[in-house]
Image (cartoon, helix red, strand yellow):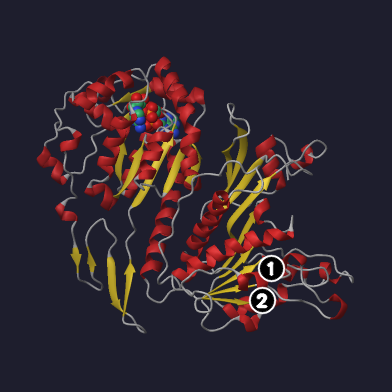
Amino acid sequence: MAFSTTQCHHKAPPPPRPLPSLSLNPPSLSSLSFSSHPSHHKLSLSNNYSFGYGKPHFKIRPKAKQGLEVMCVQSVPLKVMISGAPASGKGTQCELIVKKFGLVHISTGDLLRFEVSAGTEIGRKAKEYMNAGRLVPDDIVTAMVTGRLSQKDAQEKGWLLDGYPRSFAQAQSLEKLQIRPDIYIALDVPDDILIDRCVGRRLDPLTGKIYHITNFPPENEEVKSRLLTRPDDTEEKARSRLQIYKQNVDAILSTYISILKKLDGNRSKEVVFEEIDSLLTQVQKEKSDQTKIAFRGDTYSERASPPKNNWRGIPTRLNNIPHSREIREYFYDDVLQATQRAVTAGKTRLKVEINIPELNPEMDVYRIGTLMELVRVLALSFADDGKRVKVCVQGSMGEGALAGMPLQLAGTRKILEFMDWGEYGAMGTFISIGAIGAKEVAEEDDLFILVAPQNAVGNCIIGDLQAMTDAAGKRPVILINPKLKDLPASSGIMQTMGRDKRLEYAALFENCYLLRLLYYAGTQYPIVGVLRMSYPSPYELFRRVSEPETPQKEKYVLISSFAERPDGDDINYALEGKTREQAKKEAGVW
Ligand code: AP5
């Protein structure tokens, strides 16, 4: 089988999987030109008009109220990275993913083997590294990958990147070019299984299919007789590849932590694929929903900026208080992105919980100023998108001797009024300040940000809050560091009457962002770990580790992720290997 450039115009080929000993005489990678098959271009004029292939198809249909409604009806191209140790099953899963999702599979291992077998300059350079089980120099691989990603077929059909990035520097190269996947899948397989898989792997040079002498033996003698073993699949080289993988993996994962999905790859390939299939289907749905929202003229998100995701991992030096301006701004931006994503996805009852000392007025009432800074960032950003934002602080509650407000919120409204709201006159036009209650909701308000709503001793804010959200209807209401737990009342009433209803109401608000620093019980130093959730990612638990050379410098490493908010036991178990109960007598993490 030989490729010619003419064939390549109609077939978008990454070269088939490894063909090390065959001379294929392929055109060198840089000279290939890919395009989608002409038959894929379609123009359908039936009920709706749809144009193009690979790109979203747009239906234009008459809209009852406001002229035309433009809706994206085809799934947007997916961008997927799959990673894992050597022989974790990346190639095997990629075959199945490509079959189902039609993505362009870009495997650096395959591209390099292709260059080697073609005897190109790149191939000659790469060969010695590959055969030794070492990484090929970044500049060679990166140029190859970015060139391939920019091809038309990858842009239109979406891509599946396998085996890249393999080092922090490679990940950063993509970041600089703003090439980010929608999801980062990491396959996890125990070391001994990996070595067995490597040593037993065989490849069919004719079909590119991957076999294993015991797990997936060839169908017949004919196939068996032509199977090849990769030169880097000896036990010794497999161990060296595994070691290199382990040296790099944490740094790479930290780049993609917010979109990371770790899967157990030590299950049958069908079961692993089932999980990948459902994850990709979900991501595809979310992407197409976002596109729909962005295109629909009558939704809240009419003019919203596309949601960003620039997260770069937990910042270091959180133990140093007060935090620098950079760290504060880093968190403001982190919260902003998550909130924007949730609002753009149509969520309307949201809460942000950020518990770092700088933003936690419970520790020190003066911290309310920093919380206001965060609120200002959120409000101005939504105002920039043309929304009318009402920033609300609860007023005095209760009557007579019990009248009052939580200490942390005293004077907050005044601070808001005196703050610098920028030079563009947003305050009074796109931003207004109000209290909490039904009568605060004006028709022109698009979105409400409520600053630390909380019960006070003897008084419950939930009634006013509920009336306000009822009046707001489908407009987003975002609570910043709410505290809706029951507090003691002189009569004991708050702890009992209507408690179920209050809790039920409080549960309506879902986290679009949560960040909690974790310490050993009863201490505030040093930080043991961090729990973070940023919509739509799961809850992620990080352990703080000290860098050996500079122990005062912290680093946070992901150790677990949870679909639901983990409780104290889950966190203790993940960090300490025992539940909170078991650890109670010593040092439980809270
Ligand atoms: P590359 O080809 O990417 O090798 P790798 O990452 O080591 O991965 P493998 O191809 O070995 O394994 P796989 O995860 O695809 O597993 P597979 O599905 O085949 O890279 C090779 C070399 O190129 C590198 O060493 C490096 O030199 C260079 N290189 C590549 N990218 C680079 C980069 N970015 N920078 C620098 N250098 C780079 O499965 C393995 C076996 O297990 C098969 O036999 C399969 O049948 C079996 N198997 C699969 N799934 C299962 C399952 N669920 N249960 C049982 N068996 C299974």
Task: Provide residue 313's location: percent of width, then percent of height.
Answer: 52, 44
Q: Residue at the location (22% across, 49% down)? A: 152
Q: Residue at the location (39% across, 47% down)? A: 181
Is residue 487 something one can see in this rendering?
yes
Looking at the image, is 187 positioned above or below residue 479?
A: above
305 displayed left or right of 504 = left
Q: Secondary structure at mark 2?
A: loop
Q: Mark 2 — residue?
A: 436
Task: Provide residue 370's location: percent of width, then percent of height.
Answer: 63, 59
Q: Nearer the viewer, residue 303 or 323?
A: 323
Q: Secondary structure at mark 1?
A: loop
Q: Nearer the viewer, residue 316 or 276?
A: 316
Is residue 213 something one can see in this rendering?
no
Task: Provide residue 276's location: percent of width, then percent of height.
Answer: 44, 45
Tell me the kind of residue under disc 2: Ile
Ranked by sequence position, the earlier of labels 1 and 2 is: 2
Looking at the image, is 159 positioned above or below residue 430?
A: above
CA distance for labels 1 and 2: 8 Å
User: Which residue ends up furthest to the top in the rendered image?
Assistant: 236
Q: Mark 1 — residue?
A: 453
200 displayed left or right of 451 = left
The quadrant of the rendered image in which ligand 1 is seen is top left
Q: Are marks 1 and 2 in contact (CB under 8 Å)?
A: yes
Q: Tell me if mark 1 has few (under 14), some (14-19) or many (20+) residues whose alpha carbon lies within 10 angstroms of its own.
A: many
Tell me the kind of residue under disc 1: Pro
Q: Is mark 1 within 8 Å of ligand 1?
A: no
Q: What quarter of the picture does the C terminus occupy?
A: top right
Q: How many marks overall?
A: 2
